[in-house]
Each structure stands twice: as C-alpha cells, then as structure tokens.
Image (cartoon, grey):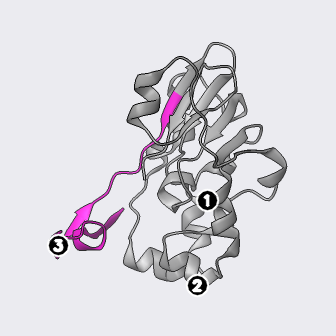
Amino acid sequence: CTHMERMVITDGRFKTVKFPSMFNLIRHPEHGNILFDTGYSMRFFEETQSYPERLYAKVTPVHLQESDLAVSKLAHYGIAPEEVDYVILSHFHADHMAAAGDFPKAKYVYLKSAYDYLKRQSRFNAVRQGLLKGLLPDDFEARSVPIEDSAMKVENDIALNDAFSRVYDIFGDKSLYAVDLP
C-alpha cells in the first residue's frame, strides 16, 4: 500500500511512500505449515466498497496482483491453502490479516487483548485505525487459539526473558516463541 510517511513515523515526511505487506512461512516439524501474518487478499477490494471502509482504500491505496497473494506464493512451493495449519496474526491491521480467510483449515493464533479491542470498535473507529473486521472469516472464533496476555517466562532462558517483557510459548512445547514488540 501507499500512505504518507508522516502518518506512521512521527517525524516522517509529508510524502507518499510504499509500505510492503508481507508474511512468512514457518515449516514446523510437528505443527505443520504456519504463516506469520497473511498480507493482503483480493477480498480487501470487496470489503472496501462500502462506507466507512471505503475511506481506508482512499487514504491507503492498495496495489495488488494475484502473484502477490500468499496463496500464490505458497503454491509456488507446492503448498495448497488447505495445507496451512496455523496462521499467527501479529496484529489486526488489514495488511497483516486480510488473507486470513484464504486458509480454510488453519487455526488462528493471536493476542486475545488485540482481538477483544477489535471487537469493541465501531466500524468507523476500526477503519480510522486501519482495522477491517469484515476481512476475518465467519468461523474465525471457532478456529481461534487466542494467547492470553499474561507474560510467560521461558524456563531456563534468562537472556530471552531479560530481553523481552513478554515471551509466549505458542504451542506450549518450547518449539516456537513469540515476543511482544510494543
């Protein structure tokens, strides 16, 4: 997408700049294919047809081709959408979660407080903050694995605990950690 730099960086320029939308694939030996964020989806354009969501598309224009989509990139590596087991959402801005619905069997991992915050927002307030509730699939909550916000200390890892205020053991088996970067 493009947006004025000043809107996201306090002392940024009053110039339109590009903001890449990304995701990462983690091939976990026990938990399967995991996406960290999803990037945009073509559904973004459908979701932003009505007011107030149309404001998001006007203020933050999205430039997207089929080849940019997570499903297209994964297909290149022989991974079908149904083969994604988990989607970890860093947060609920559209550029991080718009393609969440493209993975019909995935479980969603996210901070519970972030989702609770999203649910409390009116449509207008959500759009003002770059949040588009309609991009989440209808069965989002049924497939959710929310992370409670209480800090989880990693046993026997003093360096990790000292470096970050909150560390989350995603699967409870010490195989994948997430750290809070406020």
Q: Nearer the viewer, mark 3 or mark 2?
A: 2
Rendered image quadrant of residue 58: bottom left
Q: Residue at x 49, y 73 (%)?
A: 129
Tally the numbered discs: 3
Residue 103 seen in render: no
Q: Amino acid at mark 1?
A: Ala
The quadrant of the picture occupied by the N terminus is bottom left
Q: Which residue is mark 2?
A: 124
Q: Nearer the viewer, residue 7 or 71?
A: 7
Q: CA distance from mark 3 to mark 1?
A: 30 Å
The crowding category of the residue bearing disc 1, from other C-alpha atoms within 10 Å (few below 14, some 14 to 19, many at least 20), is some
Q: Which residue is mark 3?
A: 15
Q: Which residue is mark 1?
A: 114
The picture places residue 100, in percent across and down from the top left corner, at 64, 49
Residue 55 seen in render: yes
Magenta includes 11?
Answer: yes
Q: Amino acid at mark 3?
A: Lys
The answer to whether marks 3 and 1 mark residues whose Cβ atoms lie closer than 8 Å is no
Rendered image quadrant of residue 172: top right
Magenta includes 42?
Answer: no
Q: Nearer the viewer, residue 161 or 87?
A: 161
Q: Secondary structure at mark 3?
A: loop
Please give the range of residues in magenta: 1-25
Q: Sequence-wise, which precedes: disc 3 or disc 2?
A: 3
The crowding category of the residue bearing disc 2, from other C-alpha atoms within 10 Å (few below 14, some 14 to 19, many at least 20), is some
The picture places residue 4, in percent across and down from the top left corner, at 25, 72
Q: Nearer the viewer, residue 33 or 45?
A: 33
Q: Secondary structure at mark 2?
A: helix
Q: Sequence-wise, which precedes: disc 1 or disc 2?
A: 1
Q: Amino acid at mark 2?
A: Phe
